[in-house]
């Protein structure tokens, strides 16, 4: 199936690891031109090399998505390098295991900035440009915990739920202009967020007073498919939603969670 992404000008935020890197690599393999963004310049260098090997064209920009001018900057860079912006994937994000009573105002603010303000600013900058050309695709990477609140970090869950609502608001506002806006809601994925030393697996082990393997086994046991997703399995859905082939999908919030959230809508 030809996804129709050849030559498309794309932005992927948080593109140096995990889901973002897998998405950027897959877009490049489809022949797209991709602007990768993240904060670490060294990680950007490595990610650009990987994407360059995949095909298409990859460029990088060092950017903290929580900065007030991040949306305008990312879009300006994309237009300067590729002449337009046609695809946007709002992926940058993080979490940490923290009980409700221990979440500080700063924890809440960070999650709000990452999951609401950052995607909102990027969409606010990109969607009108896409609308002018009558074609665009935006995918917001939310979480299964946006659909079904998780006790791991309420600030994360609440703001991922808000991101689903935000995504729908942009979908409705830009549908008539050919700009299709969707979100994906992954369940647990084998990325650094969970698996790195000190990541969610180690944090869960500490909170539950069990070994890392036991904490991972407990997390897997809650997933009908019985395993974490690979980043590429989330990326494949994101890239499809970015494609020409997803031409009748907008305002959706696709679960990519191995069956974790037991809901049929
Ligand atoms: N892994 C999961 O189980 C899971 C499940 C559901 C949803 N998600 C969501 O999927 C997205 C990606 O997660 P992941 O697991 O792939 O995470 P990851 O492996 O930790 O990668 C996160 C990426 O985001 C970048 N990033 C983080 N904070 C940033 C900031 N303030 N500004 C710019 N870039 C930033 C990181 O680069 P720098 O640190 O260099 O900036 C990195 O490239 C997140 O939105 C996450 O909430 C993940």
Image: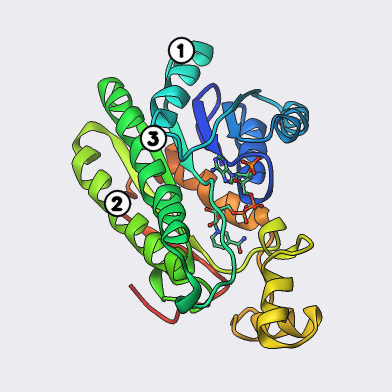
Q: Residue at x 62, y 37 (%)?
A: 24
The quarter of the rendered structure image containing the N terminus is: top right
Camera-side residue of 245 and 13: 13
Q: Confirm whether residue 195 shows in the render.
A: yes
Residue drawn at (35%, 29%), measured in percent from left and top? 126
Residue 32 seen: no
Task: Indicate the secondary structure of the residue bearing disc 2.
Answer: helix
Judge by depth and name the residue closer to the eye, 109 or 32. 109
**In whole angstroms, how far apart are the C-alphas of marks 1 and 2?**
27 Å
- The location of residue 259, given as percent across then percent down, is 53, 76
What colouring does the structure picture have? rainbow
Category of crowding for the residue at label 3, using alpha-carbon neighbours closer than 10 angstroms: few (below 14), some (14–19), many (at least 20): many
On-image quarter of the C terminus: bottom left
Packing grade of label 2 (10 A; few <14, some 14-19, many >=20) is many
* Percent of width and height locating residue 121: 35, 36
- Residue identifier under label 1: 83
Q: Which residue is mark 2?
A: 166
Q: Nearer the viewer, mark 3 or mark 1?
A: 3
Q: Residue at x 70, y 31 (%)?
A: 44
For marks 1 and 2 on the same chain, the one whose residue lies earlier in the sequence? 1
Looking at the image, residue 108 sits to the left or right of residue 62; the answer is: left
The residue tagged 3 is 122
Question: Is there CB contact under 8 Å for labels 1 and 2?
Answer: no
- Identify the element where label 1 is drawn: loop
Q: Is residue 67 above or below residue 185?
A: above
């Amino acid at each position: 199936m030809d996804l129709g992404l050849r030559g498309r000008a794309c932005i992927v935020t948080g593109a140096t690891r995990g889901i973002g890197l897998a998405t950027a690599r897959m877009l490049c393999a489809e022949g797209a031109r991709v602007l990768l963004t993240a904060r670490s310049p060294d990680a950007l260098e490595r990610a650009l090399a990987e994407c360059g090997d995949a095909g298409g064209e990859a460029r990088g920009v060092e950017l903290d998505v929580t900065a007030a001018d991040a949306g305008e900057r990312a879009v300006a860079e994309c237009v300067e390098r590729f002449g337009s912006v046609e695809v946007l994937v709002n992926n940058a994000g993080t979490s940490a295991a923290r009980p409700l009573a221990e979440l500080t105002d700063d924890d809440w603010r960070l999650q709000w900035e990452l999951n609401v303000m950052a995607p909102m600013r990027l969409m606010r900058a990109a969607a009108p440009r896409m609308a002018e050309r009558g074609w665009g695709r935006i995918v917001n990477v939310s979480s299964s915990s946006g659909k079904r609140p998780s006790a791991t970090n309420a600030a994360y869950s609440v703001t991922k739920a808000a991101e689903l609502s935000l995504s729908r608001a942009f979908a409705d506002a830009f549908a008539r202009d050919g700009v299709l806006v969707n979100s994906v809601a992954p369940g647990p994925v084998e990325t650094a967020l969970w698996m790195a030393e000190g990541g969610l697996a180690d944090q869960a082990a500490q909170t539950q007073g069990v070994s890392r393997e036991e904490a991972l086994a407990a997390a897997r046991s809650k997933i009908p498919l019985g395993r974490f997703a690979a980043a590429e399995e989330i990326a494949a859905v994101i890239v499809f939603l970015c494609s020409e082939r997803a031409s009748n999908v907008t305002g959706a919030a696709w679960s990519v969670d191995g069956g974790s959230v037991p809901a049929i809508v």
